[in-house]
Amino acid sequence: MKNKKAQIQITENIGIIVVIIFILIFGFIFYSKVREGSIKDKAREYSELEVVKATQMISNLPELGCSRNTLADMGCLDKFKLEAFIELNLTKDYYDYYRSIFGKSTVIIKEVFPSNETSYVIYNNTYDKDVNYNSLYIPINLYNPVNNTLSFSYMQIIKYTNIIE
């Protein structure tokens, strides 16, 4: 009789240990899934901040900015400086510098008003495979120093991120 009672107690103890182990395993799996979602949210947030940072850097580049009477205009790019920048073709000498600033992104400037035909691709550096991306549109003025006119344009910055899912 004592032997059967001891076997029942050992079986109960083993059952309790197995239940506790299953609870711990399910708890760990739940925690890791929640944590993984949190990490992905942080990565997306960081990616969005990188887009805003790139936008500010492009808007403040002296090699593209427009100025009149030695005063720099905010939110304005010089059309001729822009065309000269594109003519550089970002060869090896310049590519490393701008890659350190912009990273994996594409920068497009599209003239909207008065003419809707001009589009400039300032910088293009993408991954070779499918990736996530964030895009941001910023309104800017495009200054033509010959005619002394401003045209309404927008700058599109596409920032590529390689988030493992």
Image (cartoon, rainbow, N blue to C red):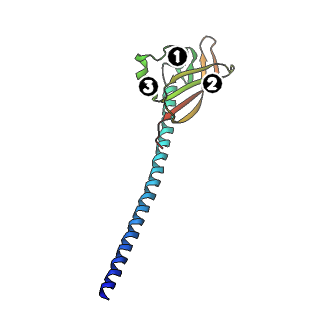
Please provide percent x and percent y for residue 14.
35, 73
Please provide percent x and percent y for residue 129.
49, 32
Q: Which residue sits furthest top?
A: 146
The span from disc 2 to disc 1 (Cα, nearest Å) is 17 Å
Residue drawn where x is 44% and y is 52% of the image: 35
Which residue is denoted by mark 2 in the rendering? 153
Crowding around mark 3 (Cα neighbors within 10 Å: few <14, some 14 to 19, many 20+) is: some
In the image: residue 47, left or right of residue 20: right
Crowding around mark 2 (Cα neighbors within 10 Å: few <14, some 14 to 19, many 20+) is: many
Q: Type of residue at label 1?
A: Ile
Q: Using the rendered view, name the quadrant where residue 22 is placed.
A: bottom left
Residue drawn where x is 45% and y is 29% of the image: 103
Which residue is denoted by mark 3 in the rendering? 99
The span from disc 2 to disc 3 (Cα, nearest Å) is 24 Å
Residue 86, numbered label: 1
Secondary structure beneath dot 1 equals helix
In the image: residue 92, left or right of residue 83: left
Q: Which residue sits furthest bottom?
A: 1
For this rendering, which residue is in front, 30 or 13?
Answer: 13
Please provide percent x and percent y for residue 149.
64, 16
Residue drawn where x is 51% and y is 33% of the image: 159
Looking at marks 2 and 1 on the same chain, the residue that comes earlier in the sequence is marked by 1
Please provide percent x and percent y for residue 133.
53, 35
Looking at marks 3 and 1 on the same chain, the residue that comes earlier in the sequence is marked by 1
Q: Quadrant of the N terminus?
A: bottom left
For this rendering, which residue is in front, 15 or 67?
Answer: 15
For this rendering, which residue is in front, 132 or 79?
Answer: 132
For this rendering, which residue is in front, 73 or 91?
Answer: 91
Secondary structure beneath dot 2 equals strand
Crowding around mark 1 (Cα neighbors within 10 Å: few <14, some 14 to 19, many 20+) is: some
Q: Type of residue at label 2?
A: Ser
Q: Using the rendered view, name the quadrant where residue 145 is placed.
A: top right
